Image: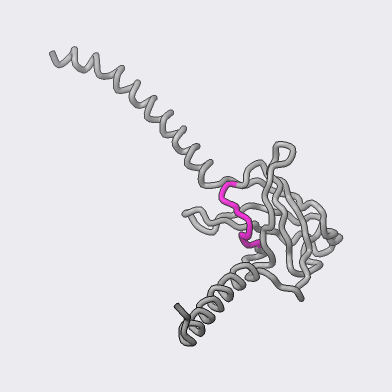
Amino acid sequence: MAISSEQKVGLFFLAAIVLLGLTIEFVEDWRPFEERYAYYAYFESAVGLKVSDPVRMAGVEVGKVEKIGIEDQRVRVDFYVNQAGQLHVDSIARIRQTNLLGGSFLGLDFGSVEGPLLAPGSEVSNAETSNIDELITSFDRNQQRVLGSLGEMVDEVQDPLVDSIS
């Protein structure tokens, strides 16, 4: 059975659409004329942070997270910024939450304007922040302590109260 011209054209356009979709997917973050300056930071925990999450300074996206891995019992986060001269030696990296539902980004402080610039490929100092997981665990622990003490107080008062009523 031979394929008609209309079917050939249809298959060609279908293949072209699939190829276009794949190209957009794989080349989405490809910017050949944009310079990238790589840095890294170490954290105790990187809960919620993912590869390709934004890197922001003062709320403005200036780069992306490229790689997250474990090194020497710490989490190493490799990232890039798009413009040179933005990070100073005293700049601080923090994992920040965009909302309570778990969205994260890597937040960078400017550092002091008078301070020397941080060379690309260098380590950026970090400041550990509490994440929502740690806050919930802490709240749960405190709740158990308070309710446990309250339960003991009720038990202590219950016996004398029952005896006085009867």
- At 59% from the left and 68% from the top, the residue drawn is 25
Q: Is residue 112 magenta?
A: no
Tell whether 144 sits left or right of 47: left
Please identify the quarter of the rendering in which residue 166 is found: top left
Please identify the quarter of the rendering in which residue 16 is found: bottom right
Quadrant placement of the N terminus: bottom left
Circle count:
0
Front residue of this view, candidates 25 and 6 = 6
Front residue of this view, candidates 116 and 85 = 85
Residue 100 position (above or below residue 73): below
Name the dominant secondary structure of the magenta segment.
Answer: loop
Tell whether 2 sits left or right of 42: left
State the image coordinates of residue 118 (x, y, percent, origin top left): 83, 59
Residue 16 position (above or below residue 40): below
Q: How is the image coloured?
A: one colour
State the image coordinates of residue 55 (x, y, percent, origin top left): 66, 61
Front residue of this view, candidates 107 and 6 = 6
Q: Which residues are magenta?
A: 47-55
- At 79% from the left and 55% from the top, the residue drawn is 90
- At 74% from the left and 68% from the top, the residue drawn is 82
- At 47% from the left and 81% from the top, the residue drawn is 3
Residue 77 position (above or below residue 70): below
State the image coordinates of residue 18 (x, y, percent, origin top left): 54, 73
State the image coordinates of residue 94 (x, y, percent, origin top left): 66, 52
Please identify the quarter of the rendering in which residue 59 is found: bottom right
Residue furthest out toward the bottom: 5
Residue furthest out toward the front: 1
